[in-house]
Image: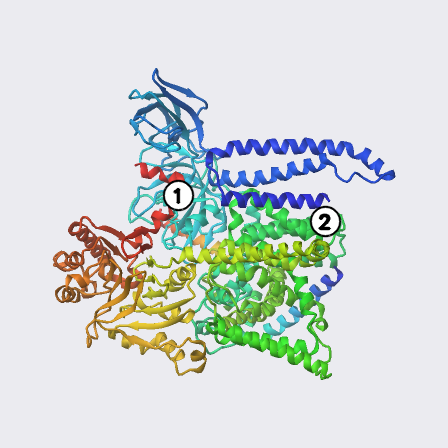
Amino acid sequence: MEQGAKTLLIILITALLLGTLVVAFNPAYRQAFFALLRDEPAKSPIWRSNRDYYTDITLPATQAADKSATQETSHDAE
Amino acid sequence: MTQNKLISFCYLFIIGIALAMAFPLGSTAVVPLWAATAILGLLAGTALHFVRRRQPADARDALYAPPPRFDALQVGAWALLLAAALFLGYTRYLAMIQPPDQTLGRVRFTAEGATWKPTDQMAATSFLKIKTIAPVTEDIELRLVGRLEALRPVLDDNGLPILDDQGRWNFTQTDLPQTSDPVRIPAGTPAGAEVLVAQPFTHLDQVEPLNQPSTGVLAILKPVNAVSLFARSGRNVVPIRALGRITADPWVYSFKTVLAITPDYIQYQPDGPYFPVERQTIRVTINPDLPIYDSLARSAAYGYDIALSGELIAPPAAANVGAFDQAKYLRNYNIGGQMLLRTPLEGALPIDIIIPQGHDVPREGNGLVEFSLYLRDEIVRVIKQTMPQPNSAFLGALTLGLRYGMQNTLSIASERYDDTSVRPILELGRDTDELIADEFRASGINHVLAVSGLHVTIITIMFMGIFALLKVSRRVYVPFVIFALVIFAIITGARPSTLRAVIMNSLFLLTWGYMGQGVRSSALLGVPVAAFIILLQNPAMAVDPSFTLSFGAILSLALLTQPFFDIFKKFQGNQFIALAILVSLLTWAFAVHWLLVVTVRFWVLYGLLAAVLFWLARLLDRRNIKPIGSYGFANITPGVAGFIAAQFGMQIGMMIPLSAYYFYRWPVAGAYANLLAIPLVGVVLQLSMLAGLIGLIPGIGIYIALLLAAANWIFSTLFLLIGHYFSRWFTYPFVVKPTLRWLFTYYAAVALFIWWRPIWFRLLRPRWNKATRAGRAIALTAVALVVASVFAAGHAETKAIRHGGELAISVLSVGYGSAILIDTPDNKAILIDTAYVQTDRGRRNDAERTVIPHVCHKRIRKLDALILTSPEPEHIAGAPTVLQHFHVGQLGHPASLDAKLAEGPLAELLAERSPRRLKHRFSGTAIQPRTLVAGERLFASTVQGKPFAIEVLGPAPGDTKAPLTLRVVYGDFAMLIPSDLTYAQQQQLLETTPAEQLASQVVIAPGHGTPGLEGILVGMPKNYERSLTEITAALLQKAGAEAVIFEFGNPRPVVGDKYKVAAKLHGAARRIVEDQLPDARHLATDTDGAITILSDGHTYTLTAQYDAAVGYVDTPTSLEICW
């Protein structure tokens, strides 16, 4: 079991290091990182590439925006 | 010892299910069988109790005396328990497939009159059946008298049914006296016949005889109100209304959503009463144009109460022999009917979400499931933020079982990703429109998307590793890991493969954590126990691919890895080099020329080469020339060597036989691709799970997830590339489907291979050594007889499928297209046309999906000829697929097809298979097309004194526009195939061909029953009825057609916007042909399925697939037949 834990730890550390390199050198991942940092995940190119993938799963902020937009529409209808 | 008996109990339960599948009794046997099972169980329990009570005394005796060698009570107790297991399996399956009708009473007719003896009361509104208990010798007329408590839902102000705060539907009940229509059972009706009564009842009070028969016994039965009882077959059926609940996570595709709705009540007829539904679910498909689509196409919809209306369609049986049987498949998943909800232009919606009284939001489902689905959605949100397409779709499917999300995801090599917001890591420069799912299937790594033992084991190890890192005791963390596995099973849809793995891993964790047992003993116990638990819940799963492939894989791993490892490790030094050369050569042949691999000459040469190489290796050994010393398989790192042996075991134990059995294909690339894919998927899955879970931590979580996902982007891209390249390098061949007998023989041989040591050393050798010469001769003869009988049975099976001396023609049901397989009396296989290939969203290749599986089902390994009759795509689009997968002796075509053969994929394939290429000349797979003209006779022969030939009636030499017109003649029988003749060409055939040359009992309607469509631009032509009457019908009359077959189906994919005109024209053609040839039989491949014609040269029989498949349809659907 200790062997399994050690393997997992190695995978985790290697992945974090490799991931850092990818984020540093790949423009899409870099932009995604900064979009998260600015709290604007919807502007991330990664999020945009997934716009047609499980469209019902949205960002929390988008959900709130959608909800308020729906409320506005219903007010208009009234 | 107890563990062994538990294992035996589980396996006998499975054998009981297998027996029920092979030899099912009627539904009336279910109740007595349950009673027998209970009695056996009770007796076994009592006997075991006595055995246990006696044990202390026996144990004391054992200290001083040897234990009794044979304890009759103990043996008897276990025999009873195992018999109970057998009965339990048999009865459980039978009860699921044929739920027993409730007997309400019997009516007995004597000379004195009729006596009605009720035995049971109805509990709910239902239709009733009358069953004959004895053969009916005199006409019986009767009617049923009782009451109907008609339920009608209470509606709110919006016209929606009201659900109270406890989740109960509100109804108003009207008590009505009910009398059935008179029912007449004619004399001569055999015992066991059933008549359905059209009127529903809630109470049955009396059976009133309407005549005075002197004898007869009838039973009045109440069928189970299953969904299938209310499902109708065909198109444009009367819609039903249903009140129910969404009881599974919706399957959200990019273009539709599929809901599993368990109905509480169904209204079968408009304005009729509502029936309580006791079993089965409805599969409901909704499209994005539905106004409330967004509310239903999400995990949160699980648990919603629903009111819906629409056509409840009985799942269709297989339209072609050997094709996918949807009815059987859905029945295995307890689905009784399907609905496709269309949004009406005006009026009420077909589906509404019902909010219970006193609530603001719809009801939720099971709390644990709701939590699991919430967790899944949160992980998907993390994936969407951290992993670009198409990798995100792949990881969603891999990690969370969201296969529907990658249904239409294009290959990573597609150039379409170059224009997306995240450019791919590698630009491969080879555009493709293949889907990832297809590439995975072809490369044999599709199994990673079926959440199974691989996933669950990786996740188990991952969690165990995390807890070990945190220094938590195994006794403490085992329950947490099991809980996580349960959540994971729910998230991924709780499919049989996942459940099997979760049950097995949980058993392993429990025995390892608290009893200190090892992996092997846990696996041997876990496999049967997991199977028992899954099959107890749904015994029909026993033949489902997801169940058998999953258990086949784990048993192959457990039982075959070591024997293959033991064999491989014997290869050392020069022997190892010889083996490596042979494997490399075979790999080259697999990759470069599959059609060569399936020839006998290849294997003869390969065997000779193997003999030479090993002889050479031994020679070099003797001369002490050893370039690699004694290096061999045993010197490879144990983990890697074991993995290779395990992969080999998986191919032999599971992939080759079961993939061929279920899918008619063997992903040959899988043997190689998995050597890379399986180690890689461990990394990809762990990183994906960790990123998904860590991403849920507020604040820093999403950043760590992004770093992990960034690394995983590289690993997952590598995985996608494995799928892409292996599917390009290797072919994905079709293979002949093994029969059940063949599978049994194969697995018997595999079992002999696994246990040959104990069988030989413990069982056979001691007896062999003691045996006399005569005894040995008898034993050898017996073995020879067994082997011979196996081969004889196999030969007889093939003969039963392909009768010598009989002409068999299959007009396949391939939508709006044509494909006809002719199995000649001297067993030559000729395929005429290859159906249509749809390349847009539907992506339906009927050659791959229907034609080739049918050919494989008929155990045909080589096509003697492929004849393409017309250049239209519905005739030739599948030709490249057929040519790619089969040896084809001849390729015949009309001159009108010359242009098609010189361009596109067909031209590429013909160039590749040119006789100029040595490898095709050597393997006999070269193709030389031949233009056919009127007057030719193909495959002319005489079988049993009757001439057979395929006569070419057209086109005339020099005609470069007309399609082929063929006439298949065998003795007195003939069939005319006029392909896509236009009206003008039909007219010409009619005028220039003598009647005796056209004479045919069976005729295929020209142009799929839409002649003249090619000349139509907009709307129906004015003279179409005249043309149909004076030309098409006249041609059929001149041929003397006794049966007319329309090769029809949905024309939209083929003819585009003209599909409505095509449908109208087809309707008109059928009507006119039926009017003009009233005595002929009229069949269509869309409504009758494939048509099979058999002829011995004198007479012929014509069978429609749907007629032959009646036995597969749930019996309750015959309700509609009565009406």
Residue positioned most to the right: B64
* Whether label 2 touches label 1, CB < 8 Å: no
Write down the quadrant of residue B453 in the picture.
bottom right
Q: Residue at x 68, y 35 (%)?
A: B77
Q: Is residue B455 visible?
A: no
Q: Which mark is residue B511?
A: 2
Write down the quadrant of residue B953 in the picture.
bottom left
Mark 2 vs 1, N-terminal side: 1
In the rendered image, which quarter contains the N terminus of chain B? top right
Secondary element type, mark 1: strand
The answer to whether B182 is drawn above or below residue B612 in the figure is above
Q: Position of residue B244 (x, y in %)?
A: 44, 39
Write down the quadrant of residue B69 in the picture.
top right
Q: Position of residue B170 (x, y in %)?
A: 42, 31
- The residue lying toward the viewer, choosing from B599 and B335, is B599
* Identity, as a three-letter code, of the amino acid under mark 1: Asp
Q: Position of residue B366 (x, y in %)?
A: 55, 42
* Identity, as a three-letter code, of the amino acid under mark 2: Thr
